[in-house]
């Protein structure tokens, strides 16, 4: 069973449909810690502000503990999307500094394209260059592909080996995807990136 | 590596049906917005935009069904606008499967609604649609019009764009009501004045009659995305032709995954 974590801040419907299209079956949308503990794979979507998303997780009794038990102790495959990926960091620095999940060392800070023509949020299709990651290898043969981004902040990992793919926006080259053991996260929206996105979701489903 | 200029086909939806739809033989039901959206999705639209022009409550209700059925089959970003009046409307459309929601008249009446929506659903989901008419030429000035361009408001369009950004809009959809439907091209001055001023993305809209107009929207207007309706609906041009035209003019467009 694959569980999509519904904590009030994700585009759940789109993620659900895309996972089904990519070949997932037995998908459940839930925030029930007891059900999450029984899941084989976990997907954490996220849209909006860092503080609100993290607050949304903490507001559900037992959710954080259930996620940590599954992902950190049991090693269940985990996919974070957009803010769901950024939450993996130690902290998010938006209006204030917010503590994240801390599963992958690093922090989330504002994009700095340093060019007025490059607007914030970065909104639209940009190239993602894979960097030694089994999912991108399987999905895209490690080629660079265009995928859909909407974000104003990016994950700055402490260790370069956690960068699964990179993207460049003006002066800023940032992590388009992060990985660590059973944990995978993407800054872009695979569920909104047509074939390239569906292929990546399929690879994630099949390679764990 | 660079961010690509988006090409966005827009569909007008009334009572759950497409107004001025694509005339293509391979569509089973040319009036069904879902079929049309799927057609654009397959052609590689960078985003799809639905503008609901239903006047009645019942017509409005069908929009949610259209949005959710579209989100079931299109894995590309979907913006929905028209008749959005409250934060609840934002939530309901996002829940139905929209990725961004455009707000127009209600935001002009109450700019705080932009802030409330941004705080509630995130700035990136909040598109402020600015419908403007030119009221002076030297120097140029534009006024905001609401209700599909019928009602003057006395509000300066450029000042309102700045306010929308300040209040947390994630994107501006700028339509020249003078140009809309004329096929004469965008009001480049209007687009350029706003893109130069704001730090958020700007979508150019209103007046596209040929591919050069799309190119000008980017090269002269500096728009981050170009929106058009009729040139795609009536099969005058395909999205691929639009991509090629931009590319030939040195504008980076998306490489489609096949």
Image: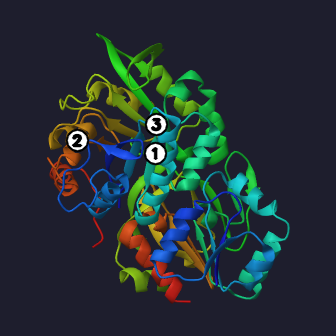
Residue A149 on image: x %, y %: 46, 58
From the viewer's perspective, tell me whether residue B192 is left or right of residue A162.
Answer: left
Asked whether B95 or A154 is in front, the reply is B95
Quarter of the image for residue B227 reads top left
Which numbered marker is on residue B195? none
* Quadrant position of the C terminus of chain A in the picture: bottom right
* Quadrant position of the N terminus of chain A in the picture: bottom right
Label 3 CA crowd tier, 10 Å (few <14, some 14–19, many 20+)? many
Q: Secondary structure at mark 3?
A: loop
Parent chain of label 1 = B
Q: Secondary structure at mark 2?
A: helix
Q: In this figure, which residue is indicated by the disc labeled 3? A: B82
Residue A90 on image: x %, y %: 72, 66
Label 1 CA crowd tier, 10 Å (few <14, some 14–19, many 20+)? many
Residue A31 on image: x %, y %: 74, 69
Q: In this figure, which residue is indicated by the disc labeled 1? A: B80
Residue A21 on image: x %, y %: 45, 75
Which numbered marker is on residue B230? 2
Residue farthest to the front, as pictured: B58
Look at 45% across and 63% down and name the residue there. A192
Q: Is residue B142 above or below residue B29?
A: above
Quarter of the image for residue B209 reads top left
Q: Earlier along the polypeptide chain: callout 2 or callout 3? A: 3
From the viewer's perspective, tell me whether residue B139 is left or right of residue A31.
Answer: left
Look at 77% across and 56% down and name the residue there. A55
Residue farthest to the right, as pictured: A61
Look at 63% across and 39% down and name the residue there. B87
Q: Whole-Å distance between the Cαs marked 2 and 3?
A: 18 Å
From the viewer's perspective, tell me whether residue A95 is left or right of residue A125.
Answer: right
Q: Badges 1 and 3: C-beta atoms under 8 Å apart?
A: yes
């Amino acid at each position: 069973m694959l569980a999509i974590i519904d904590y009030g801040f994700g585009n759940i419907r789109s993620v659900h449909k895309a996972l089904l299209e990519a070949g997932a079956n037995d998908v459940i949308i839930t925030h029930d810690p007891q059900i999450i503990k029984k899941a084989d794979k976990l997907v954490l979507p996220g849209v909006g502000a860092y503080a609100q998303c993290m607050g949304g997780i903490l507001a559900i009794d037992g959710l954080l503990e259930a996620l940590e038990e599954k992902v950190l102790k049991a090693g269940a495959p985990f996919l974070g999307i957009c803010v769901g990926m950024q939450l993996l960091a130690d902290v998010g620095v938006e209006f204030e500094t917010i503590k994240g999940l801390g599963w992958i060392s690093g922090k989330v800070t504002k994009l700095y394209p340093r060019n007025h023509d490059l607007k914030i949020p970065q909104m639209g299709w940009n190239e993602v260059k894979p960097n030694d990651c089994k999912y991108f290898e399987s999905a895209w043969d490690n080629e660079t592909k265009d995928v859909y981004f909407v974000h104003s902040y990016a994950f700055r990992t402490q260790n370069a080996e956690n960068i699964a793919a990179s993207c460049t926006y003006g002066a800023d080259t940032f992590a388009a995807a992060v990985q660590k053991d059973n944990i995978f996260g993407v800054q872009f929206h695979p569920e909104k990136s047509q074939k390239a996105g569906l292929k990546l979701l399929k690879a994630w489903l099949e390679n764990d | 590596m660079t961010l690509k200029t988006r090409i966005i086909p827009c569909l007008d939806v009334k009572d759950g049906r497409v107004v001025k739809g694509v005339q293509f033989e391979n569509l089973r039901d040319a009036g069904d917005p879902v079929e049309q959206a799927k057609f654009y999705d397959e052609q590689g639209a960078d985003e799809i935009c639905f503008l609901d022009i239903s006047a009645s409550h019942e017509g409005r209700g069908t929009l949610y069904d259209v949005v959710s059925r579209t989100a079931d089959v299109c894995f590309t970003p979907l913006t929905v606008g028209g008749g959005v009046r409250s934060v609840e409307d934002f939530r309901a459309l996002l829940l139905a499967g929209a990725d961004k929601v455009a707000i127009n008249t209600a935001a002009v009446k109450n700019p705080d609604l932009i802030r409330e929506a941004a705080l509630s659903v995130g700035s990136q989901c909040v598109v402020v649609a600015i419908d403007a008419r030119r009221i002076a030429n030297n120097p140029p000035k534009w006024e905001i019009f609401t209700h599909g361009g019928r009602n003057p408001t006395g509000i300066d369009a450029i000042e309102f764009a700045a306010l929308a950004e300040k209040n947390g809009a994630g994107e501006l959809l700028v339509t020249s009501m003078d140009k809309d439907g004329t096929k004469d091209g965008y009001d480049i001055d209007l687009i350029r004045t706003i893109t130069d001023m704001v730090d958020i993305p700007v979508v150019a809209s209103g007046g596209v009659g040929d591919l050069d107009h799309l190119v000008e929207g980017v090269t002269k207007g500096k728009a981050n995305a170009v929106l058009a309706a009729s040139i795609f609906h009536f099969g005058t041009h395909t999205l691929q032709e639009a991509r090629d035209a931009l590319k030939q003019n040195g504008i980076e467009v998306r490489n489609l995954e096949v």
